[in-house]
Image (cartoon, rainbow, N blue to C red):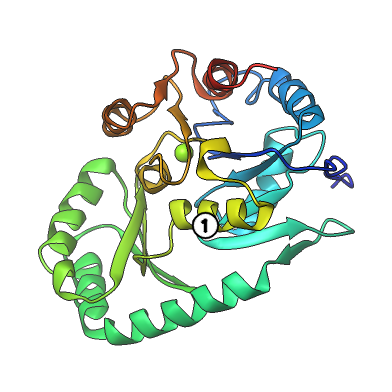
């Protein structure tokens, strides 16, 4: 893989830009999958002190593939992986964990998975016995589900929603046919708030955009004064963005993202 570098950091950070990846920047049905003009825009905004990053449900490794898929000419300044793990670019294509935050998150997750063990087992049994979906358990992400269709996921959600309110601190993040259980205080919104805090930037100077269910958490003015979704966003996301006073782009994926950037930020 080519050795990508981030743009040199600005002397003074004036704002933070956060982008969901799948469906918001890249769209497999488009050619190119990601408009190169997006990166021109980022370069332009950089001159004005904006830092930028990807805020995704993908794991860190899957996101590294994503840089290739999207034809990134340079790396983002930060990455939020699995909606909660924070990374900054290091040398030699390595990503460095933001240790303080990631360790705190990991501890909270261990605790919540342990506490909810019985419930998670019930969900696992339901998924494995009553549906065609797959229960996925990985290091650092022990309780996930991959369904075969949105309809199948909807049925599984009914099962989960009937019992989850009794599980202290347990939540889930869901995107189309994918779901992962998580601590309810760790999601794209709180991850973004931590990034902004580290950059010394208030929410009014934070821009964020996403198209799916797992983006809902970050699409609030308390996290991002400038919030948006692309034209291909889920209807639930569009309704939410409208309600929060955000911008619903007409353009799809990266074109919609460009449109939203231009709507909010004039240089
Ligand atoms: Mg998405």
The residue located at (78%, 43%) in the rendering is 75
Q: Residue furthest top?
A: 250
Q: Which residue is mark 1?
A: 191
Mark yes or no: residue 140 visible: no
The percent position of residue 226, horizontal first and vertical second, equals 49, 31
Q: Residues within 10 Å of mark 1 (few under 14, many from 20)?
A: many
The percent position of residue 172, horizontal first and vertical second, equals 32, 61
> Is 53 on the left-hand or right-hand side of 96?
left
Judging depth in this view, the residue of 197 and 159 nearest the camera is: 197
Mark yes or no: residue 17 visible: yes
> Is 92 on the left-hand or right-hand side of 179?
right
Q: Residue furthest left?
A: 162
Name the image quarter holding residue 131: bottom left
Instruction: Using the image, determine if residue 227 lies above or below residue 187.
Output: above
The percent position of residue 97, horizontal first and vertical second, equals 69, 67
The residue located at (68%, 23%) in the rendering is 38
Q: Secondary structure at mark 1?
A: helix
């Amino acid at each position: 893989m080519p050795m990508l570098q981030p743009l040199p950091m600005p002397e003074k950070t004036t704002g933070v830009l956060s982008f969901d990846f799948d469906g918001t920047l890249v769209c497999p049905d488009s050619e190119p999958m990601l408009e190169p003009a997006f990166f021109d825009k980022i370069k332009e905004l950089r001159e004005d002190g904006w830092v930028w990053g990807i805020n995704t449900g993908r794991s860190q490794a899957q996101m590294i593939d994503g840089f290739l898929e999207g034809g990134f000419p340079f790396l983002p300044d930060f990455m939020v992986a699995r909606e909660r793990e924070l990374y900054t670019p290091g040398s030699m294509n390595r990503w460095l964990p933001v240790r303080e935050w990631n360790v705190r998150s990991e501890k909270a997750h261990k605790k919540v998975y342990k506490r909810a063990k019985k419930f998670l087992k019930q969900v696992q049994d339901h998924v494995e016995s009553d549906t065609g979906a797959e229960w996925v358990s990985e290091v650092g992400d022990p309780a996930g589900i991959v369904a075969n269709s949105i309809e199948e996921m909807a049925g599984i959600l009914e099962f989960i929603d009937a019992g989850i309110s009794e599980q202290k601190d347990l939540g889930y993040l869901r995107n189309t046919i994918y779901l992962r259980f998580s601590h309810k205080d760790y999601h794209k919104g709180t991850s973004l708030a931590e990034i902004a805090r580290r950059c010394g930037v208030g929410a009014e100077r934070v821009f964020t955009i996403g198209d799916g269910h797992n983006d809902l958490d970050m699409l609030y003015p308390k996290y991002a004064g400038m919030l948006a979704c692309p034209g291909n966003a889920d209807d639930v996301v569009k309704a939410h963005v409208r309600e929060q006073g955000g911008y619903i782009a007409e353009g799809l994926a990266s074109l919609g993202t460009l449109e939203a950037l231009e709507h909010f930020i004039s240089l």
